[in-house]
Amino acid sequence: MNWEPWTGCYPASDGCKYCYFYGPYSKRYGQNTIQKTDKFDWPVRVNAKGEYNIKGDKILATCFAADFFLPEADEWRREAWAMIKQRPDLEFLILTKRIDRFPVSLPPDWGDGYGNVNLGCTVENQETADYRLPLFLSYPIKRRFAACSPLLGPIDLRPYLGGLEHVTIAGEAGREGRVCDYDWVLDIREQCVAAGVTFWFKATGSQFKRDGIVQKINPYKQGSLAKELDISILNGKKLF
Ligand code: SF4
């Protein structure tokens, strides 16, 4: 289940180049005005009986279609944190390419982190990994994962895996999507195996290179092909 409290965004790094907000073929082309959505208060909205619309024990993929730490959302994020705190029975899976804004984006009672927040730092290549992950690991966060998405090159994650619970990988989607090489994916998988970190190959992206051949993959098959390759190691981990 997704919770998108706000919408609209702008690039943070090369991985954003073909984001769904950009390019004439993009899903959300022309919609990148940063504003609250009509689902802003979704986690705490109640029905006529006064019960939460969203029942407990669920994982909410939070802000997967924008960025939780956008400066334009600073004001709204205060309320978002309050809603997150109000629902300890939900797990909020938050993804960001702006982890360097984490220290200036916290509620006063954050302490060593809220137990129901699982924060994901997105990196697309070695450069973004080497900039973002040391910061990410230095912050007080109870649960953390990395998302190599879109994966644009080989990444040595080994210096950082000790502090991560999980790694997700996906190639770049969209008509302009750049090549994702299966060798990069397998290499990161091996690093995760050696470090005892769970690993999910979520999607191939639209151009997938395997055995030296680049194949165009239909948008509807990018997830199913990754699944067919059967290389994920989840050890019973529940993803959203
Ligand atoms: S941070 Fe995410 S939503 Fe924002 S431009 Fe980059 S890819 Fe798009």
Image (tube, rainbow, N blue to C red):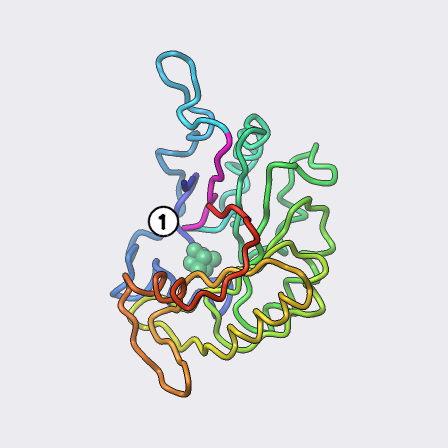
Residue 213 seen anywhere in this rendered image of the structure = yes
Residue 239 location in percent, x, y? 49, 48
Q: Quadrant of residue 123?
A: bottom right
Residue 147 in the figure: left or right of residue 175: right
Residue 63 location in percent, x, y? 46, 46
Q: As drawn, which residue projects farthest toward the top?
A: 49
Magenta stretch contains residue 61: yes
Split into quadrants, the picture shows ligand 1 in the one at: bottom left
Magenta stretch contains residue 45: no
* Range drawn in magenta: 57-65
Q: As drawn, which residue projects farthest toward the bottom?
A: 212
Is 55 in front, or is 48?
A: 55
Q: Could you classify mark 1 by the number of other residues whose Cα lies within 10 Å: few (under 14), some (14-19), or many (20 or more)?
A: few
Residue 207 location in percent, x, y? 35, 75
User: Which residue shows up at 50% across the image and 36% down it?
Assistant: 76
Residue 4 location in percent, x, y? 41, 42
Q: Quadrant of residue 171?
A: bottom left
User: Which residue shows up at 42% across the image and 85% down it?
Assistant: 211
Q: Amino acid at mark 1?
A: Thr
User: Which residue shows up at 39% across the image and 75% down it?
Assistant: 178
The residue where tag 1 is placed is 33
